[in-house]
Image: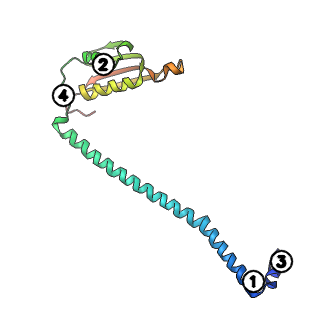
Amino acid sequence: MKQRIEQWLLMLSPREKLMVFGGVGIALFIILWGGLWEPLSSHQRALEKQVAERANELRWMQKAQQKIQQARSNPQTRRPKVRANPSQIIETTLQRYQLKKGLKQMRGNKEVSISLKDVNADQVFRFLGELETRYGLQILSMNIIPLNSDAKKAKGRVNVSIKLARIKQGEAL
């Protein structure tokens, strides 16, 4: 094979040889550029873009962190003192979120344990969010069991057991 190529090259005129070697050089350049350089440079551009996006996200998070720290140190943003019994607060909040019918059990005064059966999971989380932000009740423990008996009826429905207690003013979550 090598001898055939050498014989073929010897039969070419100097002008034809120049064109063949020029074409081979251009082909090698295109192969190296398309196979190595371009993929590496496009990957580098993608990584640079990703770094810039992450840097923007970091700046946003740092600003948000400063706002959160300011809000925590501002006495106007602290929770209002609610003197009502946690059981009463929970009961009225359950009614507001239409979870009262799922209530199977509620025990205790300072630490309240509740058990809800076949309730909407979104409503449970809204209920818990209000208890924490508005009334200063913290979740000590929670067990969520999704219902899967009938896929259409049980979608988003859960059984939940929750243990709550009051957070003292200034105490961290």
Residue type at mark 2 is Arg
Please give the label number shown on residue 136.
none
Q: Which amino acid does label 4 sit on?
A: Pro
Of the 4 image quadrants, the one containing the C terminus is top left
Q: Disc 4 or 2, which lies upstream in sequence?
A: 4
Instruction: Give the Cα separation between the discs numbered 3 and 1.
Output: 17 Å
Pick the quarter of the image with the N terminus.
Answer: bottom right
Please name the residue that numbered disc 2 is placed on.
96
Point out the tag, 2 or 1, that comes first from the N-terminus: 1
**The residue tagged with tag 3: helix, strand or loop?**
helix
Q: In this view, does 149 lie above or below 61?
A: above
The x, y position of residue 87, in whole percent, is: 26, 16
Mark 2–mark 1 distance (CA, rounded to whole Å)? 90 Å
- Mark-to-mark CA distance, 4 and 1: 92 Å
Describe the element under mark 1 as helix, strand or loop: helix
Q: Residue 16 carries which label?
A: 1
Where disc 4 sits, the SS reads loop
Disc 2 to disc 3, C-alpha distance: 91 Å
Q: Which residue is drawn at 36% across and 21% down?
A: 162
Contact flag, marks 3 and 1 (Cβ < 8 Å) = no
Residue assigned mark 4? 80
Question: Between tags 3 and 1, which lies in front?
Answer: 1
- Residue type (three-letter) at the residue carrying disc 1: Glu
For disc 3, the marked residue is 4
